[in-house]
Image (spheres, rainbow, N blue to C red):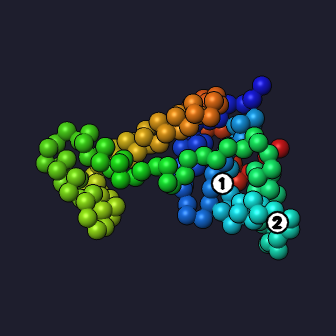
Amino acid sequence: MAAPFHLGDIVDAMEMMLDKARSFGNRETGQVVTISLELISAAEEGEEELDLPKWQEAEWELAKRIVREDAWLRLPGKYDVNEWEFMRGFADSVRSRRLQEELLDAIHGRGAFRMFKSTIHRHRIEKDWYAFRNEALREIAEEWCEENEVKWVPGRSEFHPHAEES
């Protein structure tokens, strides 16, 4: 029987979305890992050996397994998550009409992300923003599990995101 994914692990991987990495989940073990895009690309191209530092060898072996084994699924990445929509949704959820308008103004034009962060910081509502964003990421993680027909449980596993599978 396949182990369920821990929703918190998927959310953590999505929060950490990097330009130079991809996250994957193993449908058999529930393990979630983040691997360098460079190593995934090399594995997809069929490279067998790379001249890597010792600390990166385990990640390289895992990248090759991810490409070879059907058990690994690509998790939602930065192009699957629309931060601007999150910011708009948060602004729409704010009760104060004045603050709502200020947040909506902040997310338009050049420097929208910076302006939004500055506005939530100035109004001391960062905690509310991060709770809202976390819930939006959880919803995406749940949808991903349903689309991929995998079971999930709330919380986080004991796996470290970069740990080698036992």
User: Going by the image, does 145 lie left or right of 43?
Assistant: left
Q: Amino acid at mark 1?
A: Thr
Quick one: label 2 or label 1, which is nearer the N terminus? 1
Q: Which residue is mark 1?
A: 34
For the residue pair 163 and 65, the one nearer the viewer reads as: 65
Mark 2, mark 1: which one is toward the viewer?
A: 2
| Residue 112 at x, y percent in the picture | 30, 62
The correct choice, above or below, for 131 with respect to 20 in the image is above
Is there CB contact under 8 Å for labels 2 and 1? no
For the residue pair 26 and 147, the one nearer the viewer reads as: 147
Residue at horizontal 47 percent and vertical 42 percent from the top: 137
Residue 41 occupies which quadrant of the picture? bottom right
- On residue 72, the disc is none
The correct choice, above or below, for 154 with respect to 73 in the image is above
| Residue 6 at x, y percent in the picture | 62, 35
Residue at horizontal 36 percent and vertical 47 percent from the top: 86
SS at circle 1? strand
| Residue 84 at x, y percent in the picture | 35, 53
Q: Is residue 157 visible?
A: yes
Q: Which residue is mark 2?
A: 47
- Mark 2 and mark 1: span between their CA atoms? 19 Å
Question: Residue reaching furthest top?
Answer: 1
Q: Amino acid at mark 2?
A: Glu
Query: In the picture, which quadrant includes the N terminus?
Result: top right
